[in-house]
Image (cartoon, rainbow, N blue to C red):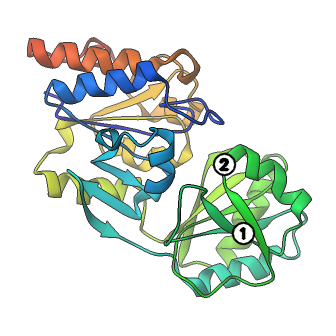
Amino acid sequence: MIKLVLSDMDNTLLPFGQTLVSPRTVDAIHEVLDAGVLFGPATGRDTVEITRFFGGDEDCFMTGIFSNGKRIRARGSYVQTTLISHDALVRIAGALDAERGMFVVCYPNETDLTNPAFCVRATKEEIAPFERRSAFVGTVVDEVPDVPFIAATIACPGGPERMDRCRAVVAEVAPDVDIVSPVPSWFDILPAGVSKGAGLDVLLDSLGLGVDEVAVFGDAENDLEIMRKVPYAVAVANATDEVKRVARYRVGASADEGMADALLEVARATRAGELPAFLREEFR
């Protein structure tokens, strides 16, 4: 039986750029919770951003994997927080100075609902499209501030070749971090070994659950590791080809509220004492 549902946010639970989870999806989450199944995000977003997405409805994120595994929450208690190395961010920001249009965005651990961020040696014009797309309030700085950061990203405008170039630059100057791309032209920076997948181990241990009791939903590169760890890995219809190859099951697209349909089916099946219908037919 499924006892925990974990869902990526952007392009899974809601279309990228949408500022609020739909009322129907929120209602479906509550149906799952009322059926006795835990629900939580497994997301690159941090908890303050998630508060905004759910309109302050904390029941929707009492449990979850946040900031790509840097923050773990189980039944309302934070059980792990991992900050990003200041030195690594300085090295990456310096290396990207020679790369046209690329820059580091740093998110302080002490934050608020405006989602403030420091953009290192970028122009306001360069920041603007990413600021609108990812919903942060950017401040241009000459150096990485010496404060604790829970998250950092890299803006990388351009196509796949530019993304590959960014990966190569970061790998050379900062082997102590990993970068993953949740959406085009954008990387999340993670301490090496930190991921949604590693966060799953911590979360399941805290909850006393096994990998066969969780369903994980996702769409992009930063979902791959966690999806490889569970039998019930589910791709939304708009997922990347790589995610579809890893996931054993499928549900509808984010734009069509496929997650709301899936969550309602989880609630129904749990009350009936059976496996959800979408987990009975593999797509591999």
Q: Is the N terminus in the top left, top right, bottom left or bottom right quadrant? A: top left
- Which of discs 2 and 1 lies nearer the camera? The answer is 2
Please state the total of marks drawn on the protein image.
2
Percent coordinates x, y for residue 251 in the rendering: 43, 18
Percent coordinates x, y for residue 185 in the rendering: 75, 49
Q: Which residue was labeled with disc 1?
A: 104
Q: Earlier in the sequence, mark 2 or mark 1?
A: 1
How crowded is the residue under tag 2: few (<14 C-alpha within 10 Å), some, or many (20+)?
A: some
The quadrant holding residue 99 is bottom right
Mark number for residue 135?
A: 2
Does residue 147 appear to the left or right of 224 in the view shown? right
Relative to 206, is 96 above or below?
Answer: below
Does residue 73 appear to the left or right of 19 in the view shown? left
Relative to 10, is 2 above or below?
Answer: above
Q: Amino acid at mark 1?
A: Val
Cα separation between marks 2 and 1: 16 Å
Does residue 135 appear to the left or right of 272 in the view shown? right
Q: Amino acid at mark 2?
A: Ala
Q: Which of the pair 20/63 is nearer the observer?
A: 20
